[in-house]
Amino acid sequence: MINGLINKIKGKGIRIVFTEGSDPRVLKAAVRLHEENILTPVLLGNRMEIIGCAKASGVSVEGMEMLDPLEYEQMDEMVTKMVELRKGKMDAETCHQLLLQTNYFGTMLVQMGYADGLLGGATYSTADTVRPALQLVKAKPGHSLVSSCFILLKKGEQLVMGDCSINIDPNTDELVDLTDCQYGTSVWH
């Protein structure tokens, strides 16, 4: 399964933002994906913290893109877009404050077409990872639910755990919708 996913994206310039750019586990995975030319990781967070963590973890982030919300030159444009997406539920100051958090900042990078996807949840809770996507990207038209899955690798065994934390007790109709999302089409548009 993992090799199939790799073959599907390798060398296609897929850009994925990593919301926890200074987490050692995230860094090691991002560096491997970069070195093997599987995708283009974009590490989010304070540049010096990311570089320090990389050194402490024995990996190099040389040649990898790092974005810090505090230094992002298009922040005003991003704030304006987020206010528009929230349709009066948040003012510019609230949006700006949220965009200083890498989970919201990364989600807006995806929403605005700068990146193809986002990886988060190493230190952010599931709720804090999914909430920005639900507020800013939304579910694909025709779908009322979103779902999650975990891919676990253990001694050569691959396990997929579907929807472990979002839809706790789905009914039959919800299961059909979720199955279509997970195995038929992408949830995010």
Image (spheres, rainbow, N blue to C red):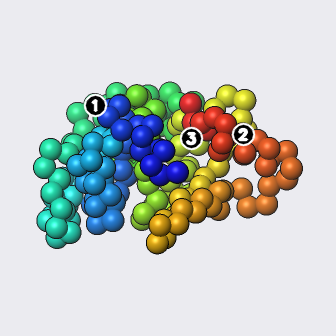
Cα gap from disc 1 to disc 2, whole angstroms: 36 Å
Question: Which residue is depicted at the point 49% across and 70% down?
Answer: 154
Q: Amino acid at mark 2?
A: Asp
Tell me which label, 1 or 2, sits earlier in the chain: 1
Q: Nearer the viewer, mark 3 or mark 2?
A: 2
All told, the count of numbered labels is 3
Q: Are marks 3 and 2 in contact (CB under 8 Å)?
A: no
Q: Nearer the viewer, mark 1 or mark 2?
A: 2
Tell me which label, 1 or 3, sits earlier in the chain: 1
Identify which residue, 42 or 49, lies in the foreground: 42
The residue wearing badge 2 is 180
Q: Residue 44 location in percent, x, y?
A: 30, 49
Element type at marker 3?
Answer: helix
Q: Amino acid at mark 3?
A: Gln
Identify which residue, 93 or 155, lies in the foreground: 155
Question: Which residue is depicted at the point 58% across and 63% down?
Answer: 159
Question: Which residue is depicted at the point 73% across and 61% down?
Answer: 168
Label disc, if present, on residue 5 of the rendered structure = none
The residue wearing badge 1 is 74
Element type at marker 1?
Answer: loop
**In the image, is 153 to the left or to the right of 168?**
left
Report if residue 155 is visible in the image: yes
